[in-house]
Image (cartoon, coloured by chain):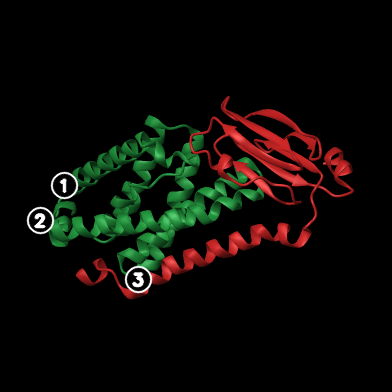
Chain colours: A red, B green
Amino acid sequence: MNRVLSFRKTDLYVPAAAVFISLVVFLLSSIPMLAGNKGGEWVVITVSGERYAVLPLDEDRELTIPGEKGLDNLLVIKDGYADITEADCPDKVCVHQKKIRYKGETIVCLPNRVVVSIEGGGEGEVDAVSR
Amino acid sequence: MRSPGKRVAFLSVLTALGMILSYLEALIPVFYGVPGMKAGLGNILVVFLLYTLGRRDALIVNLLRISLTALLFGNPYSFVYSFCGAALSFAVMVVLKEQDFFSCYGVSMAGGIAHNIGQIIVALFLVENYRIILYLPALVISGCITGAGIAFIAAMVIKRIGRRNVIDMGT
């Protein structure tokens, strides 16, 4: 019985797979930036799966987003970048995520169910209305 | 000596212990990163039971622990999160344990990862945005680390008490 209770070399496959999966997801998530290489035009804010607001990326402004449980996120759009600079959520993962500007890039605040993403290009306006 | 009453009492004590572990980790704010995401201290019990009394008792205690914890301290959302995480985690651990390819460390780490992936699947449905996948690397790595810690604790407890003694207590 002690055999299955002691660490084996084969156990290392599990963390190896974990690191591999993480790297793949990480690389896939950065592709929009590599491929698009063109600034998006719209900042799309989603709260609890519903579209809350769509703002132009080229217009500097600040917006307080009310999240799920009355917790707020402060979104700052400046110099063509969107960024969450303050949040009431406990973990601040969204604040630490880097500012975004390219189509497909995203900032997520899971506790508040807030998702900020860049959509864009020419048809951005149509998208924003029709979806 | 086999005794149904003894088994019921033993599993009940373990369920109570599991609820205390769940409550304890709810008090530690570090694990509040994602709603429902926990270090999974309760998984110590699951690994402990899988390697002593077997999967049937592990399943019973796990189900009771999750339902009772949700009733006492949680809400419907936290129940769905922890139920889906625990279900996927349990299934993965049972299958991998049968293969006898990993020790309890590999099994528990895979269980920890599965637990977090199960929760992210729930989050995908609740938040309705596929970009939550961006949380995946952090969750996979943290599941791996907590899984290793859980295996260490469970293995140590089994070795100190003795597997035979645990089986005596629980049958």
Q: Position of residue A91 (x, y in %)?
A: 49, 38
Q: Let me know if marks 1 and 2 both belong to one chain.
A: yes
Q: Earlier in the sequence, mark 3 or mark 1?
A: 1
Residue shown at 33% from the left, 75% from the top = A9
Residue designated by label 1: B6
On the picture, is A63 further left or further right than B139?
right
Residue shown at 70% from the left, 29% from the top = A63
Q: Nearer the viewer, residue B88 or B132?
A: B132
Asked if residue B59 shows in the view, the reply is: yes
Q: Amino acid at mark 2?
A: Met
- Identify the image quadrant of the N terminus of chain B: bottom left
- Label 3 to label 1, Cα distance in Å? 32 Å
Residue designated by label 2: B1
Q: Earlier in the sequence, mark 2 or mark 3?
A: 2
Q: Chain of mark 2?
A: B
**What secondary structure is found at the residue carrying circle 3?**
loop
Disc 1 residue crowd, few under 14, some 14–19, many 20+, Cα 10 Å: some
Q: Tell which residue pokes out farthest to the front in this image.
A: A79
Q: Tell which residue pokes out farthest to the top in this image.
A: A70
Q: Disc 1 vs disc 2: Cβ atoms closer than 8 Å? A: yes
